[in-house]
Image: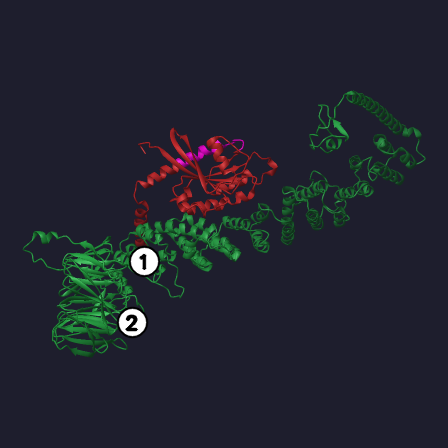
Amino acid sequence: MATRKKVLLKVIILGDSGVGKTSLMNQYVNKKFSNQYKATIGADFLTKEVMVDDRLVTMQIWDTAGQERFQSLGVAFYRGADCCVLVYDVNNVKSFETLDSWRDEFLLQASPRDPDNFPFVVLGNKIDMEESKRQVSQKRAMTWCQQKGNIPYFETSAKEAINVENAFQTIAKNALQQESDVELYSDFPDPIKIDGETGRQGGDAGCAC
Amino acid sequence: MHNVFHNQPIVENLPLKINCIQAYENKVIVGTDHGSLLLYSIEEDPVFTITLSESRVSSSRKGIDQLCLIPGTGDVAVLSDGAVTVYEIATLAVRTQIQKAKGVTLIAAPVAAQFGESESPTSANSELESRFCFATKRKVSFIKYNGSDVVLDKEVTLSDRPRTMLWLGQRLYIGFARSLSCVDVTTGAVKDLYSFRTSLTAALGSFAPVKTSSVLVTPFSGDRVLATKDNTTLALDHNGQVSQDLRVEWSSGPEAVAVWSPYLVGLFTGHLEVRRTQSNTLVQTIPLPNANMMIFGASILVASQASVWRLLPLDFEDQIEQLVTAGQFAEAKNLIEELDFPTEEDKTANIIRVRGMYAHHIFTTEHKYQEALSILKELQASPLDVINLYPDLSPPDPDGGTPEPAAPSDKKAMYLLMNYLSEQRAVLAKLRQQQEYLAGMKQAEPPDSALQAQYPVLADTLYLSEVVDTTLLKVYLSINEALVGSLLRVPNACNVEESEQLLLERQKYDELVDLYRGKGLHRNALDFLMRKASSPESTAAEVEKMVTYLHGINFEDNLDLILEYAAWILKRDSEEGIKIFTEHYDEVSPKARKGIVSFLETISEDFAIRYLEYLIHDLHDHDAELHDQLISCYLSKLKRDLSSKTGYDGPMLPKRSGADNTEDGRSFWTLRRKLAAFLEESQNYHAEQALASFPTDALYEERAMVLSRLKRHEEALRIYIEKVRNYHMANVYCEKHYDPDDPESQDVFLILLQLYLNMVQAGDYPLADVMTFLGVYGASMDATKALPMLPGTIQLKALLGYFQRCLHDMHRTRNMNEVVKNLLKAECLQFQERLTHYSTKRIRITDDRMCPICLKRIANSVFTCFPNGVVTHAYCAVKK
């Protein structure tokens, strides 16, 4: 870590189709928004350099197709992700309810070593729409985020660039944290085995009585 | 090293000296150095027997040098003492002797191009006819033979004396001392194919016993032949092109070479060497004492001077097995790759089998997990095979029996398995989707054929999915517990019984509930949670979990189930219990809402009230039935309070500020206020119905509210006057409901006046108050109706205030109307003036003037001109 080498953060955006994943990414990286809907095919990424705690990092933001679920992108795609961004549309309760399975599927595919502390960020998008159309209250979303281990939650509008910068800054920060943790792990060639073996043997000895 | 052949002695310790042998169908012909021909017959069935069926001693008693089958005849050409004689094989009778053949050194007849498919001499290959040739010094003579007559076909002169000859198809290959030529049988053209250079050893060591061997020719696959000189065997085609992929180096110069694909067999004095054609590796050495000749046809025969052996090849299956058992997987694989199988699939299957065994081997004994899994993945091995590498994780034997608990697998291997299985999960999910789609379509294009070949049937896929998911669960349980929940929450195929047991063992109760939920086993989940909640050490959290669980399942489809458990929860913790219904996010259909209400009513009105209030106030449900029900709930609760407690019954004034400060009192008054507020606010209830359920002797104010809704103002006012005796409220009532435009409500004050007057008559009410009333509200009464109602005894003076008020009011109205009238008139004039102004403006309607709205020509239609000059059809302007 002392060398301060250039860091590449892999961020994956997930969520139902049409919630605005591509728009959020475009707004953040290109500062552009289009009202026209074009379904993403497979996955696509944009990169952006960003300062996190006086450190320049490159964020590689992977936008995925909402329709596809997990079949088309292999396990390899999810491996090595540093942060997962879950997006839903506050005006579409269904897209909120599927967050659970997006999160679970992501964990299963990425199999992080410490799933409970893997950084997720939840974005409730399209808050620019009129209030009467809103189907998911802030309270409900926050309760969910809290239950899942205090996931940071942002209400955003890709259209009007509300909170987008802010949200991605947090994403970058949390991703960087995760990246450092992983590096720490990788200093030891096989940390789990050491722990597991010693723990097991100790446990066996204890159980024998 | 493994065994390819085993040798079977067929003739042993022959007292004669064997010079040459030949095999024909099931017969073996032996030529001895005393000119004897022996014919042996071999019977394989039922047991191997060999009998000497014929023998013949030649008169010359000269040794027999060579035997050569003549194809298509069943005859054999025999070379003895430089002469060629043709014998019939079956009887060993002499057919003919070739007179011209003198000093013959070699004979040859066409042989089958490929070993193994021994060319039966009787086969229909008439192209080869019955031909053979013999070499005399540097000349080769080709003979046509029809069974009795011998005709010299042609003669070809060579550059050197031939040492070996092989007739293959239309070519005769001739080996010389160190080169190889080929004669085209039809044209007689000679072509030099290859020349062996003097080997290094031979050049250097003139002391070394350099063998003066010649070039041996052996038929090989395709149209190639093998040429052997000294230690080296090469493959060449008929153009002399040497195949680069094949070069066998023997330990010394063989005396004969035979092909038994994929092996080469080399004969050395006293032993045989079996080598792999491709890799030149020595596979087997067979010691055969003094063996010095070898012929090959359907099988390979080897002979020494006194014995004949037959080489019986082992089944390739057995060979592979040998290699595998010895752990020589690479060899086994190479062998399979070289072998010819009936179909390509067979071959692939065999390779997969061996590589699979290899993977298994390196996994279990060498602990090269990564490598082993990569191989299996590459082979697209079934996940079952992979899982079987982890005995502690394998699914239980379906035949029952309790296997001994296997040793836990290595963590490192577990991680690999985890990755592997999660990949497989995705693959299987995709496949399942495809197959389900196909099953739905019945007939469709074949799906991804590679995938289909791998897991052909949906049922199989489902079974695999089950095993994969269940195993993945086990893996997670042992190395990454945090993922257990995730697996069980997403659609999965985990085996319920097995998972259930595992989760219980590990006390993963939340995950167990997730499992049940995912499988739709709501009853199991709820029963389990209920047991937990009922246990003495349970906390409120257990009940909360039940509530959360009920929130998570579909209300519509599981209503009965939900209500069943809700009853239990409500009894135990009503606050938590009611949350089942009031903190539920999903939309609940009106029918289900009503069902819930009637269910809650059976438990307690309070619950029903809370739920109804939630529906009506929070969810803004406008269903009349629900509104009615809320009223009826309020009422029945109030009625109960009224009948059960003293102090509330009888006609009474609902005091807005509770006079009764007891708990019951407060709740009673709160409820009454709620009811009153609801009756006033709600626009949805059925007033008549509500009215019917009111008690006759209480809750007058509320009753009045309902009556007002029905516009039965007289009854309502009677309540205020006669029952409640609150005249102020009666006046307020009238103020509120007076509506001069509504025929039913325009006379409310008159009704009240009549009521007051009735009381005056009865002496219950001072007339003066009536006068004041008239003074205040007189303007809201129709004077022509009010005046006749007044009793005649009233002094006009007393009515002065009323009249003043009336007149004043009328004047006010008249003046007001005058002003309005004039204002409107002025406005009308203004409009007329503006219209005139606009009408003076000229508008030009030409043929191509278009209406910008309908985009058609204005033409002769009525048109409108806007102040900004835009001209449209009048019709379009209105429509717009």
Image mark for residue B177:
none
Q: Position of residue B183 (x, y in %)?
A: 22, 59
The quadrant the C terminus of chain B occupies is top right
Q: Which residue is tagged 1? A: B351
Q: Position of residue B386 (x, y in %)?
A: 36, 55
Left or right: residue B485 compared with residue B570: left
Image height of B54 relative to B767, above or below: below
Q: Is residue A153 visible?
A: yes
Disc 1 to disc 2, C-alpha distance: 38 Å
Image height of A47 relative to B141, above or below: above
Q: Which residue is tagged 2? A: B122
Provide the secondary structure element on which disc 1 rests.
helix
Image height of B255 relative to B763, above or below: below
Q: Main secondary structure of the magenta part?
A: helix
Provide the secondary structure element on which disc 2 rests.
loop
Q: Colour of chain A?
A: red
Image height of B680 relative to B568, above or below: above
| N-terminal-most mark, 1 or 2 | 2
Q: Nearer the viewer, residue B414 or B764?
A: B414
Q: Amino acid at mark 2?
A: Thr
Q: Position of residue B157 (x, y in %)?
A: 17, 60
Q: Is residue B1 visible?
A: no
Q: Position of residue B527 (x, y in %)?
A: 51, 56
The chain that hosts pointer 1 is: B
The chain that hosts pointer 2 is: B
Give the chain coloured green: B
Q: Residue at x 86, y 35 (%)?
A: B766
